[in-house]
Image (cartoon, rainbow, N blue to C red):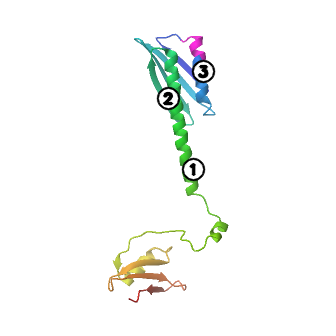
């Protein structure tokens, strides 16, 4: 990890430098390559530590103040570690969800499934004439049938393409 430590109105001693490097090892374990910018400053009686970590295109930032500089650095490291863990967990969850959604089911698995409803489609049924239903079905060449409410009878009908590919069939309930 590349570390840049800056002191504002504060001299960075070797002890503080070593302490920051040692504490940033906790953050370094999460990334292959990371950069950290540490700014330490004193305002009135408060010791302020500000740490920016940039890794994998992500930026993490923590700023804390305490009476003791070492305590302020510790708080920053804890905050950063929490942010990184949260971001990693979120990213892993997204990766897991997307991999399940795009997962292909093998043909062997499908062959094992029998007498099961494996897909449900929802769509709006509108009252139209059978002739209009044919026109709507022609608009969607990938569909083989269309369910609609027949305006003349008020009943649910199905218009479907016949195997010849030129003509259509109408399914209408008897009662």
Residue 17, position in %: x, y?
58, 16
Residue 174, position in %: x, y?
40, 89
Q: Calculate the distance from the C-alpha at mark 1 to the C-alpha at mark 2.
A: 26 Å
Mark 1–mark 3 CB contact (< 8 Å): no
Q: Calculate the distance from the C-alpha at mark 3 to the C-alpha at mark 2.
A: 16 Å
Residue, x 50% and y 34% (percent of image)?
83
Q: Quadrant of residue 164?
A: bottom right
User: Closer to the N terminus: mark 1 or mark 3?
Assistant: 3
Which residue in the structure is indicated by mark 1? 96
Q: Quadrant of residue 135?
A: bottom left
> Could you tell whether 62 is left or right of 151 in the image?
right
- Specify few, some or many for label 2: CA neighbours under 10 Å numbering under 14, 14-19, or 20 or more: some
Residue, x 52% and y 68% (percent of image)?
119
Name the magenta segment's main secondary structure: helix
Residue 21, numbered circle: 3
* Residue 97 in magenta stretch: no
Which span is picked out in magenta? 12-18
- Specify few, some or many for label 1: CA neighbours under 10 Å numbering under 14, 14-19, or 20 or more: few
Which residue in the structure is indicated by mark 2? 79
* Residue 13 in magenta stretch: yes
Whether 75 is drawn above or below 58: the answer is above
Name the residue furthest front: 115
- Specify few, some or many for label 3: CA neighbours under 10 Å numbering under 14, 14-19, or 20 or more: some
Residue 55, numbered circle: none
User: Closer to the N terminus: mark 3 or mark 2?
Assistant: 3
> Could you tell whether 73 is left or right of 18 in the image?
left
């Amino acid at each position: 990890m590349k570390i840049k430590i800056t002191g504002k109105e504060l001299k960075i001693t070797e002890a503080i430098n070593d302490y920051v490097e040692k504490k940033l090892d906790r953050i370094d374990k999460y990334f292959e390559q990371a950069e950290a910018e540490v700014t330490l400053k004193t305002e009135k009686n408060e010791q302020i530590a500000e740490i920016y970590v940039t890794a994998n295109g992500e930026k993490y930032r923590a700023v804390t103040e305490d009476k003791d500089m070492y305590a302020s650095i510790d708080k920053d490291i804890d905050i950063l570690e929490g942010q990184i863990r949260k971001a990693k967990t979120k990213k892993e969850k997204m990766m897991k969800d997307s991999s399940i959604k795009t997962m292909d089911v093998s043909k062997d698995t499908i062959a094992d499934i029998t007498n099961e409803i494996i897909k449900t489609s929802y769509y709006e049924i509108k009252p139209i004439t059978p002739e209009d239903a044919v026109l709507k079905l022609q608009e969607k060449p990938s569909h083989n049938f269309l369910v609609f409410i027949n305006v003349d009878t008020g009943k649910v009908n199905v218009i479907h393409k016949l195997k010849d590919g030129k003509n259509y069939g109408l399914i209408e309930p008897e009662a």
